[in-house]
Amino acid sequence: MHAPPAHVAPTARLLLLSLLLPLAACSVADRRVEGERLMQVSRDWSDAAQARDVEATLSYWSDDAIVIPPGEAPLKGKAAIREYVLGAFDTPGFSIRWEPVEVCIAGSGELGYLTEHSVTTVSDGVGGVSTFRGRDVTIWRKDGGGRWRCIVDTWNEAPPEP
C-alpha cells in the first residue's frame, strides 16, 4: 500500500475535521436536549406520584427495574415495585414529590442519570405529619420506542437543613 501524496494528506485531514466538528457539536447539543427531556420526564413522574395514580407511576419504571429503598431489600421487577407503591399510597397521610437537580446523559443518548431532591410526608399517628427530605439517584434507559424508563431508583434521607 502506498501513502497518499504529501499534498493530499493535509487536505483529507481538513475535510475529515470539517465533517466531524459539526457532528461533535450536534452530539453535545443533542445530549443537552435529551437531558432537558429527561428532567421533564422526572417532573411528570412526580406529578403522577403526587396524584397517587398507581398505573401512571409504575409506567415510568422499566419491567426489569430495581428500586433500592434505604434499609430495605432491593425490589426487582414491576410486580415487587407495584406492591411497594400500593403500600406507600395506602399509608395514611402519604405524599411524595421530587424535583430533578442534575442530569447526565451518556454519549450514546440511550442512558442517563438524575440526582433529585424529594419530600415525603406521612401521618405520624398522633394527628401530625412527619416530613422526610431525600436525596435521590435514578438511572434511566431508553426503551425500544425511545421513551425514558427508570432502571434503578434509590434514595436516602438528606441531612437536616441548617
Image: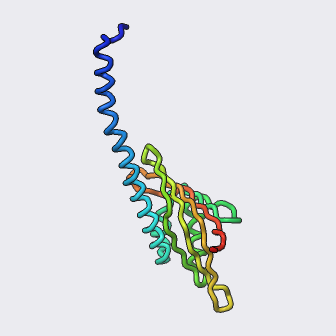
User: For residue 93, what is the image quadrant?
Assistant: bottom right
Whether residue 63 is visible: no
Q: In the figure, residue 34 lies in which quadrant?
A: bottom left
In this rendering, is residue 127 above or below 59? below
Residue placed furthest toward the top: 2
Could you tell whether 90 is left or right of 56 in the image? right
State the scheme by which the image is colored.
Answer: rainbow
| Residue 125 to residue 103: above or below | below
Residue name at image x 66 percent, y 85 percent: 124
Residue in the foreground of this view, choosing between 15 and 141: 15
Residue, x 53% and y 64% (percent of image)?
116
Q: In what quadrant of the picture does the N terminus appear? A: top left
Residue 88 % position (x, y): 59, 75
Name the one closer to the observer, 41 or 19.
19
Q: Is residue 20 above or below residue 153?
A: above
Q: Which residue in the rendered view is the most extreme toward the bottom?
A: 127
Counting the numbered discs, the total is 0
User: Residue farthest to the front?
Assistant: 162
The residue sitting at 57% across, 60% down in the picture is 137
Where does residue 145 sit, x and y in percent of width and height? Answer: 38, 52
Q: Find residue 32 and report its horizontal and vertical position in percent.
A: 39, 52
Q: Nearer the viewer, residue 161 or 153?
A: 161
Work out which residue is located at the far right of the displayed protein and give it. 71
- Report whether residue 93 is seen: yes
Tell me residue 162's x, y (percent).
Answer: 64, 74
Vertical comparison of 65 with 135: above or below: above
User: Quick check: 117 left or right of 125?
Assistant: left
